[in-house]
Image: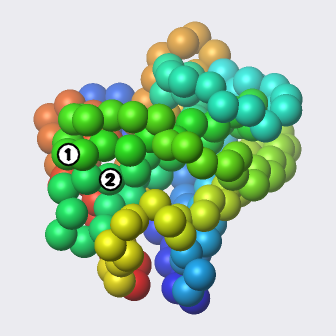
Amino acid sequence: MTTTRASLVPHTTSPAPLVAGLGVQVTLTASGRLTLHYVLRAPLAGLAIPPPGPVRFRDELWRRTCFEAFVRADGDPGYREFNFAPSREWAAYAFTAQREGMRRLDQSAPALELRRGDERLELTAAVELAGLYDSGWRTLKLGVAAVIEDAAGARSYWALRHPAERPDFHHPGGFALTLS
């Protein structure tokens, strides 16, 4: 089992003065279970945080507050994208290359847990990666990101690394975390 903690930073074009911090703990088990535990520190009354509902699939979660993970087997141009919203909605897609060949992943719903306070939001998502890579994998590259929307509708884009002039979570340079 591998566990790593990291902080996400906002893109320079999308400051987020309300957000005091956004961190993630990533755990990968030998069986291929990937768990992401996001911690957002901010006065939540000033943010657009959808209320929790049933766990269900939904497209275009990136248009609102959501947490994301991009997973690529090292050396493979294709990758998987996972989106998790505080509403407990989720999405999962496969790409053959950067923003190419997108298709919905046929996958069971992730385990999603949500904890919320006045100044803190925690979302934990667990997905099974076993079976997503036909050839197997030994090393994974991850891009961990989030979109945070404030109450006025402005969005900030957070990631481990922002390699482009504009926010782009699909950019290969954003896969900044290596797990074996």
The residue at which mark 2 appears reads as 79
The residue positioned 85% from the left and 29% from the top of the image is 53
Residue 10: x, y in percent?
38, 42
Q: Amino acid at mark 2?
A: Tyr
Name the residue beneath numbered marker 1.
Answer: 97
Q: Nearer the viewer, residue 68 or 76?
A: 76
Choose between 25 and 76: the one closer to the eye. 76
Say whether disc 1 or disc 2 marks the residue closer to the N-terminus: 2
Residue 90 at what x, y percent from top left? 63, 37
Question: SS at mark 2?
Answer: strand
Residue 19's disc is none
**What amino acid is at disc 1?**
Ala
Residue plotted at (20% across, 42% down): 98
Q: CA distance from mark 1 to mark 2?
A: 7 Å
**Residue 132 in view:** yes
Q: Is residue 31 above or below residue 55?
A: below
Taking 50 as reference, is 5 left or right? Answer: left
